[in-house]
Amino acid sequence: MQQPVSPAQRNRDNLAVEMKAASRVTIIGMILDAFLGVIKVIGGTLFHSQALLVDGIHSFTDVASDVVVLGVMKVSRQEPDDCHPYGHQRIETFGTLVLGSILIAVGAALAWENTLRLIEGDVDHIPEWPVLVAAAISVVGKEWIYRYTKHVGLAIRSDLIIANAWHSRTDALSSLVVLVSTAGAMLGFVWLDMLAAVAIAVIIIHIGWKFTWDSVQELVDTGLSPDDTEMLKTIARETDGVLNVHELRSRRMGQDILLDIHLVVRPEISVSEGHQIGMQVVAGMRNALDNILDINFHIDAENDEDHEFATTKQLPSRAEVTSIIAEHLGEIPQRSRLRLHYLRNKLHLEIFLDEEDPDSVFTLENVRLRLEPYPWFGSVRIWVAGL
């Protein structure tokens, strides 16, 4: 008989599968990037195309980013540990930030250099036809690796792999620009080659900025969109037993979502019923968004946003209340129970007596009389078994 797989083992298996898929697609992309980079740099140098040369440098930045991706993925897909109980996905976010920064730096340097050349009119040679062949090979190869890498990134829910896919797409776009500008230069518009080099550099900067900004937003715990937040609040409010939702905080960690929510329930229900209501809310939210990693719910007996300091340290504890009752009325009979409700800065008591006793001092009037002088006293109810 097959033994059931524990959630921890399932998580380890998923991490291993995701790591293998990410490594495979990244290594394939790295080999392709190196091959295309060599072709374009040599072709740009020999056949007088500054745009193709810049495009080749762009391909080599892809190789560097692939190396970063391999290292970051290996670390970020480790299992949670004592120091990182939520996992290591933020390392992936940091890697995406580094990758975006590299793109911005490379793009800015290339844009500056070729803008100066364009202004100075430093054009000595017209690009030759092999540049067209190299650019066409690059467009086809990079578009293929973009689609393959993005498919894997979506499958394993990795922002870093998806970012690397878009890095490949920028290479395909820039090669397309080289193709068009080279054709124009060969028709007599020689300046198109350097203008294309500047355009490619701007594309690199734009993609790098997008990755960097998205990563920064995640690292500073930017929450879900207002629409998603309101959707989750609606799910909670419509759950049976929930009176209101007065706080919902969210943050992202890679593709995963972490939530904290406060649920207002009826004050007289039991702790276990409150917990069950919370679990129903969790189930509804997970059905709505499948990438929620963790939901921490807090059960409130009242809306403490409307009532400041709903429960304060000045209110007595159970031990203190029991001692006060014993001092004035004696010990509560055995097998009887005391239930405390801390509401609106007052303490409301329920006493459940196991049996009716005509001589008992635990009558409604007597208990109220003894406890009313205390500023924390709110109300008292007495229940007798069988009545």
Image (cartoon, helix red, strand yellow):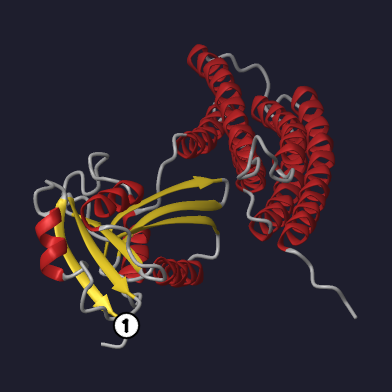
Indicate the position of residue 132 as horizontal and vertical percent values: 72, 41
Amino acid type of disc 1? Ala
Please state which of residues 368 and 182 is positioned toward the viewer in this rendering: 368
Q: Is residue 147 above or below residue 179?
A: below
Q: Is residue 104 above or below residue 233?
A: above
Percent x, y for residue 155? 68, 60
Name which residue lies at 45% across and 71% down.
276
Check disc 1 and report the residue beneath it: 385
Where is 20 relative to 118, above or below?
below
Q: Residue furthest front?
A: 359
Tell me the residue at 24%/42% (across/down).
312
Q: Judge by depth and name the residue closer to the eye, 57 or 222.
A: 222
- Which of the 4 quarters of the picture holds residue 168? top right
Which quadrant of the figure contains the N terminus?
bottom right
Name the secondary structure under disc 1.
Answer: loop
Decide which of 367, 61 is in the foreground and name it: 367
Q: At which x and y percent is residue 253?
A: 55, 45
Outermost residue toward the right in this view? 1
Residue at the spot 77% in from the left edge and 46% down from the top edge: 137
326 to the left or right of 100:
left
